[in-house]
Amino acid sequence: MFVFSIKTSKQKLILQFILIVISIILLGLIFTKFNFSGKEASCQIGKYNLSAKNNSERIEFLSQFGWEVSPEPTEISTVIIPAEFNATYEKYNDIQKEQGLDLSKYKEKSCTRYTYQILNYKDSPNGVRANMIVFNNKVIGGDVSSVTLNGFVHGFFSSDKIYT
């Protein structure tokens, strides 16, 4: 049998307790900051919901912008937001900022990209895709883009977009 004892004073015990409480509070703040909570974003059309826990919520997300999409994603892939943005990524993040999002908060995070075919884009019913970047069941970025040669890329909402 082993006996182990520690001799400490009340003052040290109280100090240790205070340090533990402060550590718990700091961890809570850090978790909240890195959880990137925020269920809505705002852009020129107003506020919109960012929830993307499942396929139906992702389709509902796109419908907020008037998009009718394929019932299932055409592609699901893992993307890692780079630690440093090059010029192309800066331009892409400018699109995100225009729609109330910002990928720079998610540098070095592993995310999932869901791609859906848009069925009601004027003059391009088969050649336009919606890409959603999801982290912790929340849309953090994405775009609407053409898959044709000399195509286009814009945010989920575009003022020149016309539905069929």
Image: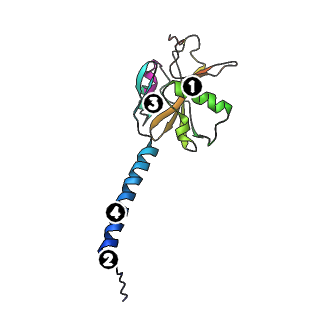
Spatial CA span between label 3 and label 4: 44 Å
User: Any magenta on residue 148?
Assistant: no
Q: Amino acid at mark 1?
A: Ile
Q: Amino acid at mark 3?
A: Arg
Image location of residue 85, percent across then percent down = 64, 37
The residue sitting at 58% across, 44% down in the picture is 108
Q: Amino acid at mark 2?
A: Ser
Which of label 1 and label 3 is nearer to you? 1
The residue sitting at 39% across, 58% down in the picture is 23
**Circle 4 — which element?**
helix
Image location of residue 59, percent across then percent down = 45, 27
Spatial CA span between label 2 and label 3: 57 Å
Image location of residue 63, percent across then percent down = 44, 22
Query: In the rendered structure, which disc, 3 or 4, sits on the residue that comes first in sequence?
Result: 4
User: Any magenta on residue 67?
Assistant: yes
Query: In the rendered structure, which disc, 2 or 3, sits on the residue that comes first in sequence?
Result: 2
**Circle 1 — which element?**
helix
Q: Which mark is residue 58?
A: 3
- What is the chief secondary structure element of the magenta stretch? loop
